[in-house]
Every structure is written in structure tokens, then in C-alpha cells.
Image (cartoon, rainbow, N blue to C red):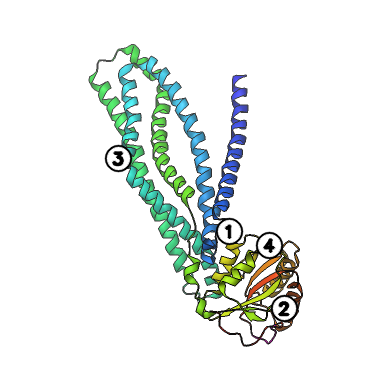
Amino acid sequence: MLALAAYLVSGVDKLVVVRAKQHICTEYFIRFFNKIHNNQGYNSKHGKIQTIAWLSGEVRQTLTAVIDFINQAWSLYLHILITFLVFYQTVGAVISLIILACFALPALLVLTSRQRIQKLSCTNQADNIKLNEALPVQWDYVLFGNASRHHRLLDAALDGYFGSLRRYVRLEQVIVIAPVAVCVLAMVGYLSIADVPLVQLAMMVAVLPRALQLLGSVHTVATINTQFNFIKNKYQGVVNFLPAYRDLATHIQPDKLQIYSNKQQTTLTLEALFDTISRPAGTHPDHIRLTGANGAGKSSLLKLLKQHNPAATLITPDSDFQYTTAALSTGQEQLLRLTELIHDPQNTILLLDEWDANLDDYHITVLNQQLVALAKDKLIIEVRHHQGGQLGGFCQQQPTCR
């Protein structure tokens, strides 16, 4: 019955571990997205790639490893404690103290190697991110780029990741193997010089399988102690992670921007633009266009406007709201996504960045007419680069905003 009970407990334990992994991952994802919520300084293509690589790779690996480590550690230490007490009563104090010293030796080695382990864990974590970031680049090289170069970046990323992992494993094995070797040599030396009674020797032979199991536990404990620092440092890296940040305000050049209001038929200042978007949704409809040279900060300005009013909906070429799952062309998918977003009654403030990319002149004209009609009830602020004559009532020559 006890064996059956233990078997059932082990099954429940596995279920608890899975639920714990789900809980810790869910909590982390929620807190992470709350931390960066509407902070547009993190909103970039590189930041998105970096974050997806981080969340889908390093975060799940580390958080699930933490749960597995805790589950393994407490059961292992409990098992060792019970086994050691039985062993002490059977073989005496000297052999027991030698084994106890072998359990302490890995802790000392881990303590002296702590900085090295910390450095290796940080390096391995950074190399893992680089590997995950290299995968979409590899995709582009294979399908779009020069075939002679497409393995270089991925090979370098793989070498970096497994290189740091090999260095850690080498250090771990030194910490793991040394205590077991010392323990065996110390026991052999003691038995060689000590006058051990035959009865005690017989008892040692009788518990030999248990002794070998305990020596195996020394190996496992040394591994656990080493992994504790490795996983702890990786967990701290996971907790403190934030994607690359850009100060958007420094990328805006007001003297190179033109801001034109179709409703007022005049140019606006930056202050007037921010005042417009600050008003309650639906109270100040307008159709505003931002133009300017490359690098003037048009996209950065849209992101700041979004940050200024979280109720606004920012639509960029990189944004993906998963409105479509069908196999559509790039233009068809963008057309469907735009149509659904701009006609959504909840989206009363629309910030559109190069929405006409990948669309033909006909569909640009159709969508532009829809935007003009929607601007009677919504505030629409757009950045446009397509020049096909379809300006929807906008003046062709717009004076510079000052």
C-alpha cells in the first residue's frame, strides 16, 4: 500500500509541476507586458524581434528550469538526509564524516567559482538571444539573399551559444567529479590503515548498494549546487530583461516636418498636434497628415502621440493584430487588416504609418476615400510616402511646420 501511495504521489507531483510552470510563465508574461505597456521607446522592429526571441526561448527555458530545479532539489536533499542517518548508524562515525565532508566540498568549490559561474550564465543567456535573433535573418538569407553567405551568421551564433555552454559544463564537471574522487580515496585510505572490526566490515558490505547510492548522491548534489548559481543568475537576467530602448524625442526634427490639417486647411505646430490628440475621443475629428524627409522623425512622432494618448490605435508596417489567417498576398493581407481596423468603432483615434505600402493605386484610392469619410467622426493622423495623386483633399504643397 505504501508503494502504491508513493506511486500516486509521484503522479500528482508531475501535475503540480506542470501547473507551477504555467503559473510562473503566465505571471512573468503579464508583468513583462505591463512593464513595457505603451512605452513607445521600446517599440521598434529590433525590439520586437529581440523580445519574441527572449520570451519564446530564454524565458520559458529558464522559468521551467527553476521549477524543475526546486522540485528536484527538495526531494534529493530529503532523500540524502534519511539515507545518511541510516548510513551513520550502520558504518560508524568516521566513514559517515568522510562522506559528509564530500558533501561540503562541492559547496566550497561552488563558492570559490561563483563569479565564474555568474559570468558564464550571463554569457550563455546573451548567446541564446543572439541565436534566436539569428534565425529570422537566416530565413531571409536562405530565401532572399546570397546563398554563399547564408550560413555564416547562424554558424557564428551556434558556436557562441554552445561554446559558452561547453565552458560551463567543463567547470561543472570539475566541481562534480572532484568530491566523489576525494571521498573514494579517503575511504580507501582509512580502510587501509585502520583496524576495522570484521563485524563493521560485514555491515559495510551489506550496505554497499546504499553506499554507492549515497556516493551517487554526492555527484548529484554537486551538480545541483553548481546549477543553483547558474540558474539563479539566469533567472535574475530574465527578471531584469527589457528590450532595446530609444529616446524618441531625440529623433524628431520639427523644422523638417510638415503637419497639415485637412479640416482646418492649415498647418499645425507640434503643440497643437499634441493638444488635438489629448482631447477626448470623438470630440475633435480631423484628418491630419505628417510629411517630411527620411530621418525627420515622422514615425517617432506617431509613437510619441500614441504614448501621449493610450486610447489611440497605432498601425505600422510591423504591427500585427492577427486579423487574418488565410493564405493571402502581402497586399491583400494588409488591405484586409487596414479595412477591419479603420472601421472598428472602438478605434476612434487612428495613427497610420505608411499604410499605403504594398498597395496598388486602385486600393490606395479606395482606402483614402474611406479615410476621408471616417475623418468626419474620427481623428486620423497619417504618415504617407506614396505619391499617386490621391491626396484626398490635401493640399499638394504644404508649408513647413515651425
Mark 1 burial class by Cα count in 10 Å: few <14, some 14-19, many 20+: some
Numbered badge on residue 285: none
Which mark's residue is nearer the viewer, 1 or 4?
4
Say whether residue 389 is magenta.
yes
Tell which circle, 3 or 2, labels the residue nearer the N-terminal end. Answer: 3
Q: Which residue is mark 1?
A: 38
Number of the label disc, if any, that sits on residue 112: 3
Q: Range of the magenta residues?
A: 387-391
Disc 3 is placed on an element classified as: helix
Residue 153: which quarter of the image? bottom left
In this view, the mark in front (2 or 4): 4
**Are discs 2 and 4 less than 8 Å apart at CB?**
no
Query: Helix, strand, or loop for circle 2?
Result: helix
For discs 4 and 3, the disc positioned in front in the rendered view:
4
Say which element carries label 1: loop
* CA gap, disc 3 and disc 1: 44 Å
Q: Nearer the viewer, mark 3 or mark 1?
A: 1
Task: Please provide percent x and percent y for residue 198.
Answer: 32, 13
Amino acid under label 4? Pro
Is residue 124 shown left or right of residue 401? left
Q: Sequence-wise, which precedes: disc 1 or disc 4?
A: 1
Q: Is residue 311 above or below residue 2?
A: below
Q: Amino acid at mark 3?
A: Thr
Residue, disc 4: 280
- Name which residue lies at 42% across and 41% down: 227
Residue at the spot x=40%, y=41% of the render?
229
